[in-house]
Amino acid sequence: MMDNSQACAETNGVLSGVAGVILSCNPISGFMWNVWKDQQDAKWKYRVKEFMRYISSGDFSADLFKSESSQDGLALSFRAFIQQRNKQKRKYIKSIFFEFIKSGAEEDFELERNFDVVEKISKEQTEILRNLYITGTVLLVSENTFQKEVDTVYYSNSKYLESLGLVYIEFYSEVRMEEEYEADYEGGVVASTHLTGRDIARLETSETLVLSDFGKEFIQYIQE
């Protein structure tokens, strides 16, 4: 493995600006330089170049990467980016990385957790999050004595989002007293109904989907 001085010297002929300084001149990100060198002919070469162009943009300066935590975050972001095949998800990674660097609180920023969610979440699930962010809450299940209303696919996706810590489900139940009614039949068919004058208890339950604090943070990174 080349040392930092050799990497810096070679970088001048390949990269320029912030990218050259960051990728070759600190030990934390040393492996990134080796990936750049080794993957020139690999199928994911364009992802490496895409990331290089991004950190060479005017949004970043070498001063932002002086701390060990910021360098470590850069290395993690680089790895996540070049391993991600989905173009839209690479945009999410760049957005997360940008907020990480700009936060000034790199030690507290949940970088790995955000990248893990990006890897696991589906397009349909991101749409659920976006809609939930707009509406505030979504009624998942409504059930009473007579009927139960639930979209099983939506419910399954919501439970998965809950497992990722992006949402939580609020449960509600209430007993309502209502006057009983009976059906009047003619020829085996309900012709009418009438109230009996007796009160009966009916249980109503519901499940409502709500964004968690982490979900409110994550949704900012996946806005179109």
Image: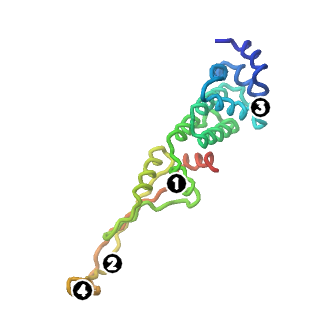
Given residues 108 and 45, the one toward you in this image is: 45
Q: Amino acid at mark 4?
A: Asp
- Measure the alpha-carbon separation of dots 4 and 1: 45 Å
Given residues 146 and 180, the one toward you in this image is: 146
- Measure the alpha-carbon separation of dots 1 and 2: 36 Å
Quadrant occupied by the N terminus: top right
Residue placed under numbered mark 2 in the picture: 178
Q: Residues within 10 Å of mark 2 (few under 14, many from 20)?
A: few
Mark nearer the N terminus (4 vs 1): 1
Residue placed under numbered mark 1 in the picture: 128
Residue placed under numbered mark 4 in the picture: 184
Q: Which mark is residue 61?
A: 3
Q: Which quadrant of the figure has residue 154? A: bottom left
Name the residue: 41% across, 60% down.
151
Mark nearer the N terminus (2 vs 4): 2
Task: Name the element at disc 3.
Answer: loop
Q: Residues within 10 Å of mark 3 (few under 14, many from 20)?
A: some
Mark nearer the N terminus (2 vs 3): 3
CB-based contact (under 8 Å), mark 4 and mark 1: no
Rendered position, 163 above or below 50: below
Rendered position, 131 above or below 123: below
Q: Position of residue 90 (x, y in %)?
A: 61, 39
Q: Amino acid at mark 2?
A: Glu
Name the residue: 60% across, 28% down.
43
Mark nearer the N terminus (3 vs 4): 3
CB-based contact (under 8 Å), mark 1 and mark 3: no
Q: Left or right: where does residue 199 sit relative to residue 51?
A: left
Observer-side mark, 2 or 3, equals: 3
Task: Name the element at disc 1.
Answer: helix
